[in-house]
Amino acid sequence: MANCQNCGYKWSYSTSLKKTFLRFKRSMECPNCGKKQYQSQQSLKRSSSLTLIPLALLPIAWLLDLEISTAYGLAGFLLLAFVLLHPFTLELSNEEQPLW
Ligand SMILES: [Zn+2]
């Protein structure tokens, strides 16, 4: 789980989840010290590769001749799994880092 890079405060699962998905900017405020935190580059890479999994599923669904609704259900399930697992991949940084 993520630790604030400014004060070392450990973000809880629900804090990480809310800060990640209920935001409009790239920055997230630490609930303890209020300093802006950003998702670290490594963590960004990890989460962006996770989002590719549902996409990779499409050709597989086509190959296996799955019903489109089954494929969508599977993609939805993976998306949910991604959202729920995201706090475990979250790492914080004091500065905004580019993805690549
Ligand atoms: Zn903090």
Image (spheres, grey):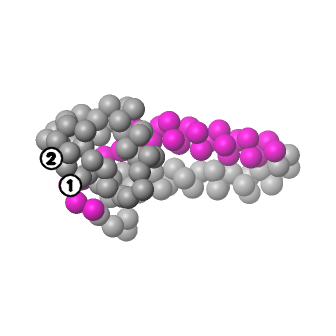
Residue at image position (80%, 54%) is 62
Marks 2/1: CA–CA distance: 7 Å
Task: Determine whether, in the image, residue 84 is placed left or right of residue 35.
Answer: right
Disc 2 and disc 1 in contact, CB within 8 angstroms: yes
**Helix, strand or loop for disc 2:** loop
Is residue 20 shown in magenta?
no
> In the depicted view, which residue is nearer to us: 54 or 24?
24
Residue sitting at the far left: 7
- Disc 2 under 8 Å from ligand 1? The reply is yes
**Helix, strand or loop for disc 1:** loop
Q: Is residue 80 above or below residue 38?
A: above
Residue 6: mark: 2
Residue at image position (51%, 50%) is 50
Stretch in magenta: 69-96
Could you tell me which quadrant the C terminus lies in?
bottom left
Q: Amino acid at mark 2?
A: Asn
Residue 94: mark: 1
